[in-house]
Image (tube, helix red, strand yellow):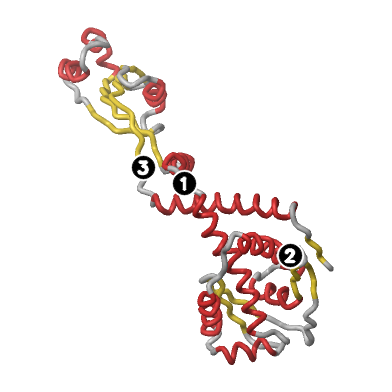
Amino acid sequence: MVSGSFKKVLCGVLLWTAISFSAVLVDRVVASVNSEPILESDVKMGMLFYEGLTKRQVIDKLVEHMLLYQFLIGKGLQVPQELIDGTIQNIARANKTDLEGLARELAKENLTLQDLRRFLERELLATQGLMAFLGREIKVSDMEIELEKLKRGDIKVVRNIELLVVDKREGSKLVDVFKPSKPLEVIAKELGVNLERLRVSRGELVEVLDKEVWRAKVGDVVMAEDKDHIYIARVISEENTSQDKDIEEIKQEILLRKIEQRKQELIERLRKNSFVKVLQ
């Protein structure tokens, strides 16, 4: 049995789990992908790195990663040995040990540093390598960013308006001076009221006026009234405003979504064109 917590670092992420090993590990073939074997030791490593998955789920993930690994190898990609070495060093440091201590921990269950190295080579190429490969051919356009911001509500439509608010008791006077073609500034002076210039979003005005303002076209003059007031508004202009979200962050999120979609499409295609055998 391995006591305590075995800490792992994979692709720059520190993972923690408590691990209990079986007494004996026989390194047998549990699956194959295009005649390339997935071993019991690979599954055991997967149980460490893919926390919370069942053994069958781990095997399924290893099959997917083997498909991606083979595909990328076929494209001429490989994992630099220094990246694998650095990842193993990070795992050792995370466990507050050195390579010898890590080897002793693995040896308790007949696992070796070579088993770990083989697992990491496939894992890094199927994750980081795939991200780099797909990232070169997948682009995010400015239009996609703007649509994403709009979908999130990061872009808000506002209207600039001129507004007169007249007491209903002055209604007869308003009838005498009001003409749609007359500037509201002139009407305001004749009525002795203030002309307000506002920048508003949908829903920010009183309900009766809000409906008219957002129904109108730019340049239109609209009127509305409630129990106490008569409202006259001219729609001066309309614009879209951003709420200062990080453009690069939004772009990265879109890119990751597109990469994940392309990855699933690629796995599906590879499965159809590959011979996969699971022995349990």
Q: Position of residue 273 (x, y in %)?
A: 74, 53
Q: Quadrant of the N terminus?
A: bottom right
Say which residue label 1 marks: 140
Give coordinates of residue 135: x percent, y percent.
51, 55
Percent across and percent down for residue 250 are 44, 50
Q: Please, is residue 121 above or below residue 266 in the view?
A: below
What kind of residue is marked 1? Val
Work out which quarter of the rendered image holds the C terminus and state it: bottom right
> Image check: 257 left or right of 273?
left
Q: Nearer the viewer, mark 3 or mark 1?
A: 1
Task: Point out the frontmost of discs 2 and 3.
Answer: 2
Report the side of 234 relative to 123 (left or right): left
Q: Can see residue 280?
A: no
Pick the front one: 51 or 132: 132
Residue at horizontal 33%, vertical 21%? 218
Where residue 68 sits, quadrant-wise, is bottom right
Task: Mark 3: give few (<14), some (14-19) or many (20+) Cα within 10 Å.
Answer: few
Along the line of sight, which residue is nearer the eye, 41 or 210? 41
**Circle nearer the N terminus (2, 3):** 2
Q: CA distance from mark 2 to mark 3?
A: 43 Å
Q: Quadrant of residue 124?
A: bottom right
Circle 1 crowding by C-alpha within 10 Å: few under 14, some 14–19, many from 20? some
Q: Is residue 104 above or below residue 80?
A: below
Tag 3: residue type?
Ser
Q: Earlier in the sequence, mark 2 or mark 1?
A: 2
Label 3 sits on residue? 242
Classify mark 1: helix, strand or loop. Answer: loop
Q: Which residue is mark 2?
A: 57
Amino acid type at circle 2 is: Gln
Q: CA distance from mark 3 to mark 1?
A: 19 Å
